[in-house]
Image: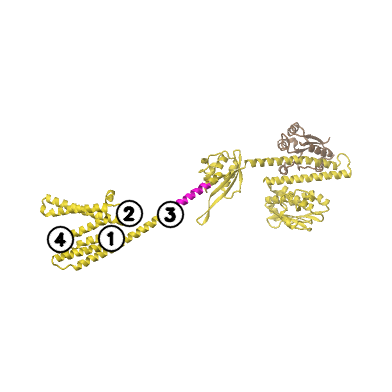
Amino acid sequence: MSELALIIEDDEDLASIFAEALRGVGFEVEIIADGQAAQERLQNGIVPFLILLDMHLPHISGADLLTNIIKKEDQFSKTIVIITTADARMGEAYNEEVDFVMIKPISFVQLRDLTSRLKPKG
Amino acid sequence: MNSLNRFLTISTTDADDIRRRRILNILVMSIVALSLLAIVISLVSVYFKAIAWENVDLIVIGSLTTILGMLLVYSINTRFSGRIAAVIFLVFLTIVFAFSDTPQQVSGGRSLFGFAIPIIMASILLVPWSSFVFSSISGIIVSVLALSVNSVPNSPAIIGFFVIALVSWLSSRSLEQALKELRTINANLDHVVIERTKALAESLERERIEAGRSQAILNSIADGVVVFDTSWNAILANPALTGMLDLPLELIVDKNFRDLIEHPKLSPRSRTLLRAMMEYDTQPPSFRIEWDQKTLSISAAQVYDYTKDRFANIGTVTVFRDFTREAEVEKLKSTFVAIVSHELRTPLNAILGYAEMFKEAVYGPMNDKQINMSERIMKNTQRLLGLINDLLDQAQMEAGKLTIQMAPVRPAELLENLHSILDQSAHDKNLKLTSEIDDSLPEVLNGDAARLHQILLNLVSNSIKFTEHGIVHVRLFSPYRNRWGIEVSDSGSGIPESEIPYIFDTFRQVEGTTTRVHGGFGLGLSIVKQLVHLMDGDINVKSKTDVGSMFTITLPLVIPEENIEKWRIG
């Protein structure tokens, strides 16, 4: 069974590009476009192998999701977290808290190459 | 005393005349008083039978006659003429003395001295030289009396009269001259006082007009103006300020600025700013505060006055300007910039992503032309993103929102990032992009990594853009102990000398045509310069047409605390 990658991104096109890159590497992909929905999904017991989290989301911001759930709950301790933001300053601010920070614009190839290195072999 | 004074004084305009007639009155009154005293003493003596009436009848009758004569002199003196009164008085006195004793005694004996009195008085009561007239009269009387008793006229006495006349003439004359001079001085003094008073009144009036004009100007200024003394007491304010703050003038003028700062309408941040303005002599040229719903711009300047040979600080003049509308526009602008930044970048990111997917043949094989086309889409999208970033940076810098955040930075990492991004562009143009780090530079230093990266990226991509063959070289170094620098040199087309002063201007490229050849807004170098200045650094350029250009940036070198020891040992 392939690992689950959760993409939390409100822009449909970006989400589909990211999904294509991750699927290309061999992840099973789930896309959530809304902060509120993402919070419910994460609280429902889903534990993804990797989360690609946009910091600017409707209803509940990515920053809140990160601080209040992902970094708080034990079950996500092994989950790889990549945040995406257009704000380089914000990226720097969260550099220590997450595994990777990607500053928009995010390249398809860059994301694909990074995640392929992260995915366990086999 | 006043009534006595009135009794003695004669109202006329000639000061000398007044003086003389006054003296005459005093003499007349004294004689009247003496005569009254003589009558009283005589009558009392007779009453107590100490003396017989026959012995004093002449004294009483003489005294009464004297009193009547004196009253006549007094009335002539006060009502008619001082001179005539004085002449009558003196003649009377002379006659009295002439018949006051036996002719022998008067002409050469004990009563001779009596004549000196009218002689001296004449110079005082009439004109000074009249003493000679009375000395002559006295001389004649004495001679006549002497002859009448068959005696020789007393020539030493007559000479003595003239000597007395001479002395009293001299003293009266000098007294009158002194008085005259005194009067002239007084008159001059009066004149000077009048002139001075007039000048003072004029200058006061001028000042009043001037002050009125200044107040009128102050009142019609649209900006709020308040002037504080050195203890920050408001000494004056204009109506515009009261309108701006919505406070009556009484709550501003004569109040201390500290009271105004505590007003609840002022935001806490503004309070801090205003306190800083009061506490430190050096203020920013202008800053903004929030008062109620308003944004006010404040500029303060010290007032200096040149007094006692030096400039003294006499207070602070503070100008308030209503900045509410401008502040709203600025806020709108920054919101707009934030939205645009997100809304423009997101679709561009999508275009970039899809183009990459084509290039990577995600949905099946692509031919060379298709791959080339996706590459062109990607390149143009990157360019568009770059332009948007430049515009946003420029907008942020104009709004003063762009700040520098210092953190430990590895120079080597800066170069690695640069190579990873620009190696391809250099390679595409057949250029060599090389770099080096001098031994003089520490491994870690304090800096804003993102902004340093941006500076390098801008300078190096600029060099690549304007270089057709050869190399682009980057060198990081430390010229002095507390500075470090970035040097970017190329073998490109160079910059004409006449254009060098303008290359850091906003929206500018060398010569009008190059914009079309090379594209771009011409914002890159302007942003670099502004960033360098934000970092307290300097930027210089050396260039020679067709040989190349070299940009040199120097920045303050600060080594992070935790690396200092290591750096010293190293």
Specify the colour of chain A.
Answer: brown
Which segment did they paint magenta?
Answer: B196-214
For label 2, the SS is: loop
Chain of residue at mark 4: B
Is residue B219 left or right of A10 when viewed as pictured?
left
Is residue B289 left or right of B157 when viewed as pictured?
right
Classed neighbour count for the residue bearing mark 1: other residues with Cα under 10 Å, few (<14), some (14–19), many (≥20)? some
Colouring scheme applied when the structure was drawn: by chain
Residue B84 lies in quadrant: bottom left
Question: Mark 4 highlights which residue?
Answer: B101
Is residue A34 left or right of B19 when viewed as pictured?
right
Foreground of the two, A34 or B98:
B98
Q: Are marks 3 and 4 in one subunit?
A: yes
Image x and y of residue A21, in percent: 82, 39
Chain of residue at mark 2: B
Foreground of the two, B226 or B559:
B226
Q: Earlier in the sequence, mark 2 or mark 4?
A: 2
Image x and y of residue B456, in percent: 75, 51
Q: In this view, does B379 lie above or below A58?
A: below
Question: Mark 2 highlights which residue?
Answer: B13
| Residue B201 visible from this viewpoint | yes
Q: Are marks 2 and 4 in one subunit?
A: yes
Q: Earlier in the sequence, mark 1 or mark 2?
A: 2
Identified by mark 2, the residue type is Thr
Question: Mark 3 highlights which residue?
Answer: B196
| Residue A78 visible from this viewpoint | no
Q: How many marks overall?
A: 4
Identified by mark 1, the residue type is Val
Q: The yellow chain is which one?
A: B
Image disc number at residue B127: 1
